Amino acid sequence: NAGVTQTPKFQVLKTGQSMTLQCAQDMNHEYMSWYRQDPGMGLRLIHYSVGAGITDQGEVPNGYNVSRSTTEDFPLRLLSAAPSQTSVYFCASSMTGDGANVLTFGAGSRLTVL
Amino acid sequence: AQSVTQLDSQVPVFEEAPVELRCNYSSSVSVYLFWYVQYPNQGLQLLLKYLSGSTLVKGINGFEAEFNKSQTSFHLRKPSVHISDTAEYFCAVSHPFSGGYNKLIFGAGTRLAVHP
């Protein structure tokens, strides 16, 4: 069981470039989410999805886009990267309903914007 | 709105000593509470959770936490730590009625450093 797979693990971008962080899960989880982790601030929710075709904003959505065309995949897009988006990004998924209380996290993607 | 405060950013401790990592939350409604651990260069792993029932919750690796509603706290404890417990620990809260999914709000984290 692969769980939650994030790619790439590391990425360096220049200001203004665009890129997509990939997230895939093989557990048939309905709920998927993206967090960013910054020193001294813990993890902050960027966007989340409760199923294919349904997405919503979290605490810090500005500068990021998401879509959910399949249950398995939840990519995070940076359309015009800024140095403030330098961070470690985590994708997490869970069941909904009674199984909703355990999130499974990916290993993270470290992004540096110069 | 919910929020989580982890009262210590770093906790140094000697091996085999007891440790307590403190967590306070604010919420106007009932909550679910969680502790996650992050080992270096890895994702987060669930240590334990409080959903309802007994206020003393036991988790993996010998950790336990106690939910105190009157003090809005959920402190994490271990009676004897090992070098391998060196990691960052995150307290998190969610609203149990948020549409059946788990939108977690995290604290800033506590870095536990266990020294020989």
Image (cartoon, helix red, strand yellow):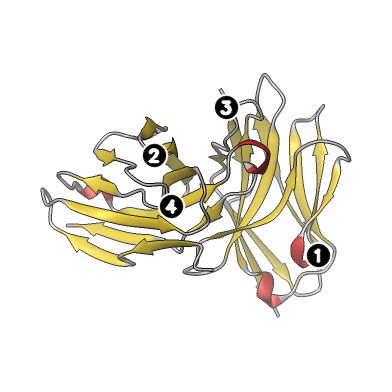
Q: CA distance from mark 4 to mark 1?
A: 27 Å
Q: Which residue is mark 2?
A: A52
C-beta proximity under 8 Å, tags 2 and 4: no
Q: Amino acid at mark 3?
A: Gly
Looking at the rendered structure, whether the residues under marks 2 and 4 are on a common chain is answered as yes
Label 2: which secondary element: loop
Q: Which numbered tag is attached to residue B62? A: 1
Q: CA distance from mark 4 to mark 3?
A: 20 Å
Identify the image quadrant of residue B59. bottom right
N-terminal label among 2 and 4: 2
Could you tell me which chain the residue with mark 1 belongs to? B
Classify mark 4: residues with Cα within 10 Å, few (<14), some (14-19) or many (20+): many
Q: Nearer the viewer, residue A68 or B53?
A: A68
Q: Is residue A98 left or right of residue A90?
A: right
C-beta proximity under 8 Å, tags 1 and 3: no
Q: Which residue is mark 3?
A: B99
Label 3: which secondary element: loop
